[in-house]
């Protein structure tokens, strides 16, 4: 009887651990599956005419690196993601080219404020608390 109880405990623990691991890895898989192109910032659709060198984009790697382009300068840094969607982006460094008419400061400021993420097949939303601050779609 004791052996049966121990066996059931091991099976239950393994089952819960397996479910938790699968759930945690799913957002990371969606996050790293695409290069994401900015479609909204602070609740407003992005006007492509304001970005003479292309819309801002971002890519996430499985080794917690983030990189992309702000519509003017390239950037890279690191990110952390937990199994509930919590995210932070840090140590962002960018090149320093001047681009006429591109306000990349707002984009970088928004990246630094990210506290949560929601990755779906066709949409990546980054939040500060419950406020959507950056919305991306897969780059085509």
Image: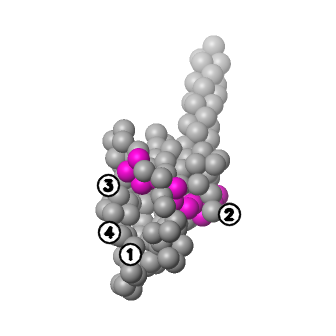
Which residue is denoted by mark 2 in the rendering?
Answer: 140
Mark toward the start of the polypeptide (3 vs 1): 1
Mark toward the start of the polypeptide (3 vs 4): 4
- Observer-side mark, 2 or 1, equals 1
| Spatial separation of the CA atoms under disc 3 and disc 4 | 13 Å
User: Residue 5: x percent and y percent?
Assistant: 60, 18
- Observer-side mark, 3 or 1, equals 1
Which residue is denoted by mark 3 in the rendering?
Answer: 113
Secondary structure state at the residue bearing disc 1: loop
Is residue 42 one of those drawn in magenta? yes
Residue 120 in view in this figure = yes
| Spatial separation of the CA atoms under disc 4 and disc 2 | 25 Å
Say few, some or many: other residues with alpha carbon within 10 Å of mark 4 (under 14 / 14 to 19 / 20 or more).
Answer: few
Residue sitting at the far top: 1
**Occupied quadrant, residue 76:** bottom left
- Tell me where the magenta segment starts and ends, as one range: 33-43
Tag 2 and tag 1, C-beta contact below 8 Å: no
57, 103: nearer the viewer: 103
Secondary structure state at the residue bearing disc 4: helix
């Amino acid at each position: 009887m004791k052996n049966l109880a121990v066996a059931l405990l091991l099976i239950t623990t393994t089952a819960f651990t397996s479910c938790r691991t699968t759930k945690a890895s799913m957002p990371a898989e969606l996050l790293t599956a695409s290069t994401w192109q900015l479609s909204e910032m602070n609740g407003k659709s992005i006007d492509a005419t304001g970005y003479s060198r292309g819309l801002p984009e971002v890519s996430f790697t499985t080794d917690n690196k983030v990189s992309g382009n702000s519509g003017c300068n390239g950037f890279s840094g690191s990110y952390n993601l937990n199994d509930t969607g919590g995210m932070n982006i840090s140590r962002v460094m960018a090149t320093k080219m001047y681009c006429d008419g591109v306000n990349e400061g707002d984009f970088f400021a928004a990246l630094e404020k990210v506290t949560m993420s929601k990755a779906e097949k066709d949409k990546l939303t980054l939040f500060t608390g419950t406020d959507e601050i950056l919305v991306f779609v897969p780059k085509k």
